[in-house]
Image (spheres, rainbow, N blue to C red):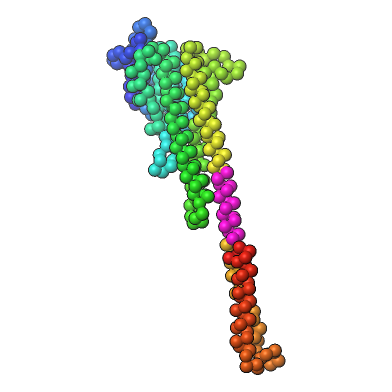
Amino acid sequence: MIVDCAIYQHGRRTERPADLSDALDQARAQDDAFVWIGVHEPSQEEFDHVSREFGLHVLAVEDALKAHQRPKLEIYDDSLFMVLKPVTYEPRSDEVSSGEVMIFIGDSFVVTVRHGEGSPLSAVRKRLEAEPDMLRHGPTAVLYAVADAVVDHYLEVAVELQADLEELEAEVFSPDIGGAGSTASRIYRFKRQVMEFRRATGPLAVPVSRLAGVAPSVAEVPFVDRSAQLFFRDVNDHLTRVNESVDGLDRLVSDVLSAHLAQTSVRQNDDMRKISSWAAMAAVPTMIAGIYGMNFDHMPELHWVWSYPAVILVMVLLEFGLYRLFKRRGWL
């Protein structure tokens, strides 16, 4: 469905076009104007009408309808097509989820397509309408503002994930040995959230570097003002920080998992030593009792009046000696 449609002239919003079919013609007929249409999860019929009016490429239209795309930047004859993946973080469930924003920009028009809930488009439009000097730069300003909002939110999500990782580290290195299974499950779930985050941030590096003009051996991107490269460089710097944070999170969570597995192995070895020690202590009296329970006629001290207390005393002394030995070695 079409969420919003407006014509902007000299950086200020004008009347909403009465008919979508006339919106682009009205914008091109005015000086320094463009039309911005926002669409949310459009159907085939709804977007076919938009694509015909703005001459959008059939491959880009297919991507915009199907969603589930990697972040990318594609150049067509009459438009530029960019895909971004906004990310949201739910602190109560510690889950990262991503939506999708597709942006078409061309001669005097911007079409934004949103999938999912993790999208900054409403806030971006309000912010741009409050800054006419920025909006005066036309479709390029919209592309920059959306990319900047998405990447800035990446930084916030990275901070939240870092805090979660610190909690996991504290849990892993806690002296409490209980809940090993739940800790391993939390580490695995956290690693999956980092992977989901990486799918949104990693592939975006190349498109943003192209817009910023810092990618090697890349021609100038059409439909984007060359003067805007400085702004996209700021976005590129923020994205680089995010990707470095994601790489650090991924390495650290792998180290935390390795440390957890090592601690679990050590604790299991300690448990096995304790079990073996108690089994050895139980085996000594069992062995003595077993020997004297064989009922042979000719056995040492069998008919001695002090045999019973003597055997009990020997058992106690052997048990005490084994206990001291295992305790000294740290097995008990």
Residue 46 left/right relative to 193: left
Q: Residue at x 38, y 32 (%)?
A: 117
Q: Residue at x 50, y 27 (%)?
A: 239
Pinpoint residue 119: horizontal percent, then vertical percent: 39, 29
Q: Is residue 106 magenta?
A: no
The picture quadrant where one finds residue 139 is top left
Q: Is residue 206 left or right of residue 123?
A: right
Res 43 seen here: no
Image quadrant occupied by the C terminus: bottom right
Residue 179 location in percent, x, y? 48, 55
How many labels were placed on the picture? 0
Query: Magenta stretch: residue 267 in it?
Result: yes
**Residue 309 location in percent, x, y?**
60, 87
Which of the 4 image quarters holds residue 1? top left
Span of residues in magenta: 255-270
Q: Position of residue 293 (x, y in %)?
A: 63, 86
Question: Considering only vertical position in the picture, is 179 above or below 126?
Answer: below
Identify the residue at horizontal 54%, vertical 16% (top origin).
213
Q: Where 233 falls versus 184 (above or below)?
A: above
Q: Main secondary structure of the magenta part?
A: helix
- The answer to whether residue 255 of the structure is visible from this angle is yes
Q: Foreground residue, 73 or 304?
A: 304
At a point 52% along the width and 18% down the height, the residue shown is 212
